[in-house]
């Protein structure tokens, strides 16, 4: 036992006792007790990254919006702020109802939705292929990325007067502002998504003897498409912002134009109503794209 005790990582007292008992069994001796392993702790409900049901998610979201609405009602009822600065919710709802009844609301909303969809689609159709090339080839990256980085730091608002000089104040000017505000950002975001495609996937394509164009279309694009879709969701929010900026400066119709007209006549209930409407439209488009991702990308964990 002395030789065993002096060896490297020798047994401790408990292990020595078990060894001695095994070599010298005692009649009617009780078997050594074995400690149960540590119990697995149950994941706390609502803990770090713990999933919750859709019903609970929706309930929490509704409660947050309801709490904000109650605070607004209370502030308006108490007269904390003058109505010209903070109209009551009922005043805003009544004004929206009035504008909807005479068709002004639907006309403004339809024109703005048309402009946002066309401008955003033009930017996306151009940005996705270019982002694929920049993310797949270092030559394209060297040629395109520095230029895109240079342009994307230029303020979009500064292009509004120039766009009026170039194309006038029609819908083309709104499309151009949306394109400037989203295209360059989309190229870089798509490029980053493409770069995150595992190199093993590309190596598999080369092993199978696929040409570059088929590796891009059959391997890189399907792998990167969930991330590209998230990029489109994010950039759609920017597109709404730039559309309203363009309509605030040079327009004769649309949601942004109506906000400017309401400002001239101190109709803050109209301003609040249209701002809330823009938020609702943005939330709806975002949630529609989020729901579409769960059906389009079932082959990924993100789309489940």
Image (spheres, rainbow, N blue to C red):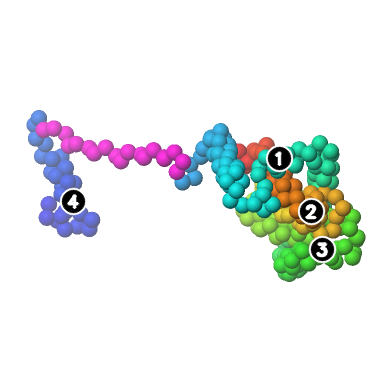
Q: Position of residue 296 (x, y in %)?
A: 69, 39
- Classify residue 42 by image quadrant: top left
Q: CA distance from mark 1 to mark 4?
A: 78 Å
Q: Closer to the camera, 235 or 136?
A: 235
Q: CA distance from mark 4 to mark 3?
A: 79 Å
**Label 1 sits on residue:** 93
Q: Are marks 3 and 1 in contact (CB under 8 Å)?
A: no
Q: Closer to the camera, 124 or 253?
A: 253
Q: Which comes before the other along the chain, label 3 or label 1?
A: 1
**Label 3 sits on residue:** 160
Asked if the magenta segment contains residue 36, the reply would be yes
Tell me where the magenta segment starts and ends, as one range.
Answer: 29-47
Q: Are marks 3 and 2 in contact (CB under 8 Å)?
A: no
Q: Is residue 200 left or right of residue 34?
A: right
Of the two numbered discs 1 and 2 in the rendering, the one whose residue sits closer to the viewer: 2
Q: Which comes before the other along the chain, label 1 or label 4?
A: 4
**Image point 20% across, 54% down: which residue?**
10
Q: Are marks 1 and 2 in contact (CB under 8 Å)?
A: no
Whether residue 228 is visible, yes or no, is no
């Amino acid at each position: 036992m002395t030789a065993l005790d002096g060896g490297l990582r020798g047994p401790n007292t408990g292990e020595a006792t078990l060894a001695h008992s095994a070599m010298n069994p005692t009649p009617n001796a009780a078997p050594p007790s074995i400690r149960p392993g540590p119990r697995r702790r149950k994941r706390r409900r609502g803990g770090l990254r713990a999933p919750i049901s859709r019903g609970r998610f929706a309930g929490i979201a509704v409660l947050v919006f309801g709490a904000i609405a109650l605070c607004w009602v209370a502030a308006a009822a108490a007269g904390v702020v003058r109505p010209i600065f903070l109209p009551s919710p009922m005043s805003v709802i009544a004004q929206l109802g009035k504008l909807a009844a005479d068709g002004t609301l639907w006309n403004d909303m339809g024109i703005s939705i048309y402009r946002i969809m066309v401008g955003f689609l033009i930017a996306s159709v151009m940005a996705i292929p270019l982002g694929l090339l920049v993310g797949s080839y270092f030559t394209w990256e060297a040629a395109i990325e520095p230029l895109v980085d240079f342009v994307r730091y230029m303020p979009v608002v500064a292009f509004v007067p120039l766009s009026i000089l170039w194309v006038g104040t029609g819908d083309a000017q709104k499309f151009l502002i949306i394109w400037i505000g989203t295209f360059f950002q989309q190229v870089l975001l798509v490029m980053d998504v493409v770069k995150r495609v595992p190199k093993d996937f590309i190596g598999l394509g080369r092993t199978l003897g696929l040409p570059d164009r088929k590796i891009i279309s059959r391997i890189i694009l399907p792998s990167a498409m969930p991330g590209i879709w998230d990029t489109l969701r994010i950039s759609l929010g920017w597109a709404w912002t730039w559309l309203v900026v363009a309509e605030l400066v040079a327009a004769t119709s649309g949601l942004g134009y109506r906000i400017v007209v309401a400002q001239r006549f101190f109709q803050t209930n109209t301003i609040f109503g249209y701002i809330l409407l823009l938020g609702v439209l943005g939330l709806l488009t975002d949630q529609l794209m989020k729901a579409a991702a769960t059906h389009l990308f079932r082959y990924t964990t993100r789309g489940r």
